[in-house]
Amino acid sequence: METIDEGGLPQLKALDWQAVILANGDFPQTGRALQILRSTQTLICCDGAYRPLRAEGIEPLAVVGDGDSIDPKDRQRLGARFHLVAEQADNDLTKAVRYAQGIGLRRLLVLGATGKREDHTLGNISLLEDYARMGLQVGMLTDHGLFLHCRGNATFPALAGQQISVFNLTCTGMESSGLRFPLYTLRKWWQGTLNEATGSTFSVTADGDYLIYFVQGKKNRFH
Amino acid sequence: METIDEGGLPQLKALDWQAVILANGDFPQTGRALQILRSTQTLICCDGAYRPLRAEGIEPLAVVGDGDSIDPKDRQRLGARFHLVAEQADNDLTKAVRYAQGIGLRRLLVLGATGKREDHTLGNISLLEDYARMGLQVGMLTDHGLFLHCRGNATFPALAGQQISVFNLTCTGMESSGLRFPLYTLRKWWQGTLNEATGSTFSVTADGDYLIYFVQGKKNRFH
């Protein structure tokens, strides 16, 4: 795999992903995301994302889904690369993740999981916790940043001034060092937003699950 | 106010909003949202959203923010319509909501609160609970659907086949009637997604706070 541009997102390198999964949300727009899609050898695509992927001239290793969201001609073209998973208990992203796990891959980078319907965005982000419980390491790269699921104490690389948001899932105690606003035990999603790394690393002390969102680049004010 | 197109989103009518707030996320794209922005007499705009609003030829009643996200020339042009709120404990959306509350408005419709950075999307959605505790009724209309904060038992209008997602905030008990998949006490964000109204109303029985996301229109598969 060629070297991926990690400028502005030093957390990406540590993921060392074995496969990339493209979900059905907004098709990635950043140069880095397109570079990742083009260069990965192991690209697994949710069926609704195959059309925009193909429009970029990129062919995945496999397409996974319930078949509802794919053009019958595309499905025929894919042949054995199309993997039908008819059950409706999981969404297409989880079906693709399970497929990856089934062929022995456990470090995954998900692209295209946000945008469009906000309920799907919320659902996909929250699935990171489930994937961690399945024994997988899954990062979610968007056009604006990177979500990682974390559990317990952890130290992360950062850029001084990089915007950081933390979302508590199951912690009853949270603290931090190296963040502009020290963490406390967050009760609401908004409470952990708009934070900032003060140096080249920061640490979280926590007794449960949480999500960290690393914004791409340094200070990038929006609100 | 002219009649707003509520086709595909019958929950909008019940809001009976007194003012519209435009936040700094993706500028609304749907015809309905633009119609709302154009026709409202009481439009309050977060400062970062003033430029795209003005590009549409729409002038708000007031612009609220910390002044970091607005062109100095725009600020000068606004004159007394610009309301500087320098404190950094609240984001610009909350500053605009507090401004509305301060001038006696309590039923609000927020547009432009999602898109761009996902941490801001999560934060803004979660603020609906805080606004409810401030005694306000706030709906959040996106290009894809409508978020409402709810508490306790409630019955909602719907379209048969309309996609519905429910996000539990503080409930320790949840049930429903009129949804394809009966609610249970949801623990994770994804658990309440991909549901569907079976008829023209549905009801939720719950002992706490939750969010409902009404997808615009009937069956609109994405995953």
Image (cartoon, coloured by chain):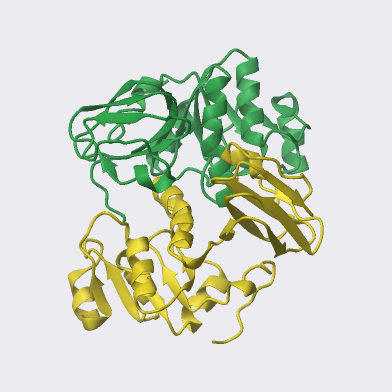
Chain colours: A green, B yellow
Q: Is residue A57 visible?
A: no
Q: Position of residue A181 (x, y in %)?
A: 24, 40
In which quadrant of the rendered image does the C terminus of chain B lie?
top right
B42 shown above or below B222: below
Between B175 and B122, which is closer to the camera in this rendering? B175
Q: Position of residue B105 (x, y in %)?
A: 43, 77
Does A117 sit left or right of A174 as displayed?
Answer: right
Total numbered labels placed on residues in the image: 0
Q: Residue lying at the far front in this picture: please name it.
A: B207
Does A79 sit left or right of B15 as displayed?
Answer: right
Q: Quarter of the image holding residue A64? A: top right
Residue at left offset 50%, top offset 83%: B39
Residue at left offset 45%, top offset 63%: B112
A35 shown above or below A15: below
Q: Position of residue A30 (x, y in %)?
A: 40, 43
Residue at left offset 21%, top offset 61%: B68
Does B180 sit left or right of A138 as displayed?
Answer: right
In which quadrant of the rendered image does the N terminus of chain B lie?
bottom right
Q: Position of residue A95 (x, y in %)?
A: 67, 29
Q: Residue lying at the far top in this picture: please name it.
A: A104
B62 shown above or below B155: below
Q: Quarter of the image holding residue A222? A: bottom left
Q: Is residue A182 visible?
A: yes
